[in-house]
Image (spheres, helix red, strand yellow):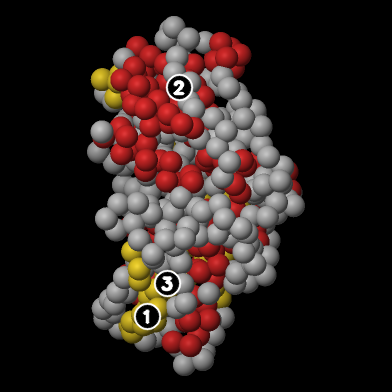
Amino acid sequence: MRLKALAVAVLATIIAVATSERPAALGNPGITPLPCADLAWQKADPKFDALPGAHAFFGAYDGGVYRIEIPERWNGELALYAHGFVPSTGAQGLALRAGNSPIREHLVKEGVAWAASSYRCNGYVPGQGLVDTMALTDLFTKSNGGRKPRRVFLTGTSMGGHVTVLGMHEFPKSFAGGLAMCAAGPELFDYFAAVGAAAEVITGKTFTLATMQDDLTTMGDVLGKPPDYTERGRQLASVEIQISGGPRPFAAEGLVSRFLGNINGGAIAGGTTPANRAVMTTHIKYRIDVGLGLTADALDARVRRKAFDAAFRSAKGPYEELVPFDGKLDRPLLTMHGTGDLFVPVFLEQTLKRAVAESGRQKWLTQRVYRVPGHCGFSQPEMIKAFDDLSAWVHRGVKPAGDEVEGDLSHAGMRFTEPLRPDDPGGLRVDATSTRLSH
């Protein structure tokens, strides 16, 4: 039952968005979000108390709820915060909630106002998240006695990181700079589908749309679960780490909570939602550690492949959030990613880097890697330094230092991680198939 619940949650991540008729564009021109599911969304109370030396504003807009905090000594700048994925299932799945910026205290101390909202629906909805987050600027101005911000920063975590990178591409002149933390992106769902295709080969079970939940349960029985992998489970664990960015600090630990959750068969089994139709796995080159009884060549030859549907995954597609980023940045973007993130893996940083390089816009991108187990587990010092460095970049025009996100990441993250986490592997290489360390 636990596996089935997990499978439902993962599928909700990908297909929670309704597939009804495409509506007219909402909000600002240039972005048409995937339509929200037609559910009885409920606006939760957004009330919160201001920090000392600041004023709190909160309320409802036509699609959800919002929070705004303005320092008494406001410096004229506003940091918008886009939150991450909220499942549309479960007891709180219909509740639209507004949270706080994760660096709220620091922003207020520095005189920077912040604003955050729910979106008008839950689920994986970065397009709608961008529309609703951008609407916060007008809500802020109304709350601030008609005084507009002179600079607006766009920040976000996880799916909110996808919102941030999307916003920096689609509306670059609207923001002074962007901070994308543990950012997701369109290619994340390629990864889930590629893991699902590998799981079919490794377990001998083929997904069908009619038997998806039972297929996942059978796979779980064959694979085991961390740390008690079966022989075939160790094969899939190696594949998940290898194609998500390669062996790196805390990768095995991060896989513990995501091993079975990363398996998705919706797209390769013929799912027809826009998100499934946009998935592409034909470009995936499988990798696996030696000595596990399966080779990368065998996987590449046997896995089911999914070609993308150009009606959705192209510059002319109806929904920008499904289309890979073209890298055409015009304002500073600083990204943060954890090595142990197996939910939204670091390979997305590699994909973003290549897109920006192909567009010739490298001067606008700085990427940083952190030795962090799990998803979005950044410390306050790490997030604060990243925002301050972004702000200094915007103010002074000097690009801050970053990390190399491609190549061997087995020693990655030493420069900006603060502090090193307990059980940090130091200079040892991470074994992709266990929690053991080896030289």
Tell me the quadrant of the picture where the C terminus can be found. top left
Query: Position of 302 compared to 67: left or right?
Result: right
Q: Which of pointers 2 and 3 lies earlier in the amino acid sequence?
A: 3
- Residue under the point 31% across and 20% down: 221
- Residue under the point 46% across and 50% down: 16
Query: Looking at the image, is 141 positioned above or below residue 369?
Result: below
Name the disc covering residue 59, or none: 1
The image quadrant of residue 7 is top left
The image quadrant of residue 93 is bottom left
Q: Which residue is mark 2?
A: 199
- Residue under the point 37% across and 80% down: 59
The image quadrant of residue 31 is bottom right
In space, the residues marked 2 and 1 are separated at their CA atoms by: 46 Å
At label 1, which amino acid type do we have?
Answer: Gly
Callout 1: SS: strand
Q: Residue 256: horizontal and vertical position, in percent?
A: 31, 31
Query: Looking at the image, is 417 positioned above or below residue 132?
Result: above
Q: Which of pointers 1 and 3 lies earlier in the amino acid sequence?
A: 1
- Residue under the point 36% across and 80% down: 58
Instruction: Assess whether mark 1 and mark 2 are in contact (beta carbons under 8 angstroms).
Output: no
Q: Which residue is mark 3?
A: 64
Q: Which of pointers 2 and 1 lies earlier in the amino acid sequence?
A: 1
Q: Residue 389: horizontal and vertical position, in percent?
A: 49, 60
